[in-house]
Image (tube, helix red, strand yellow):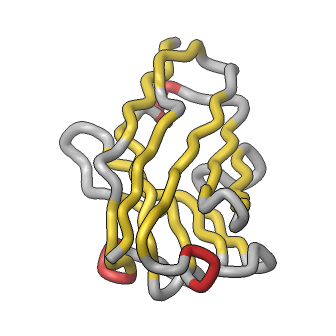
Amino acid sequence: QVQLVESGGGLVQAGGSLRLSCAASGRTFSSIGMGWFRQAPGKEREFVAGIGWGGGIRNYADSVKGRSTISRDNAKNTVYLQMVSLKPEDTAVYYCAACKRVLGAVDAGACEYWGQGTHVTVSS
């Protein structure tokens, strides 16, 4: 079992930045891949970014590539998502997840454990 708790969401103006955090507990954090997903109202949950257990492998959705950085601190059992140049279309609930796979076309089925989500609203 892995318990995940996201934080760092909020209201931000377009062009602004946010850093989301996801604190993990339970199963050995440093041995699992982690991902960030988001779900906008009326839309399916979509992959945003993923990072391998050691941090050396990173994967980004095209929609956030160049504007987002995923990182992890295994000593703190925490994964981060730094987002800059935010756009109104980035508005969504953001979830972190413990995933079996973080490379290639990652969908929600690749992930076993999920946090409750944190809301991000980007105003125009």
State the residue at coordinates (37%, 77%).
111
35 or 121, nearer to the observer: 35
33 or 85, nearer to the observer: 33
Q: Which residue of the protein is positioned furthest toward the left in this rendering?
A: 42
**Residue 104 placement: quadrant:** bottom right
**Residue 41 placement: quadrant:** top left
From what the image shows, is residue 49 above or below residue 104?
Answer: above
From what the image shows, is residue 13 above or below residue 108?
Answer: above
Residue 16: x %, y % from top left = 68, 20
State the residue at coordinates (45%, 57%).
96
5 or 124, nearer to the observer: 5
Residue 64: x %, y % from top left = 63, 50
**Residue 86 placement: quadrant:** top right
Residue 32: x %, y % from top left = 55, 82
State the residue at coordinates (70%, 48%).
68
From what the image shows, is residue 30 above or below residue 121?
Answer: below
Residue 20: x %, y % from top left = 57, 40
State the residue at coordinates (44%, 78%).
27
- On the rendered structure, is 55 left or right of 43? right
Disc count in the image? 0
**Quadrant that contains the N terminus:** bottom left
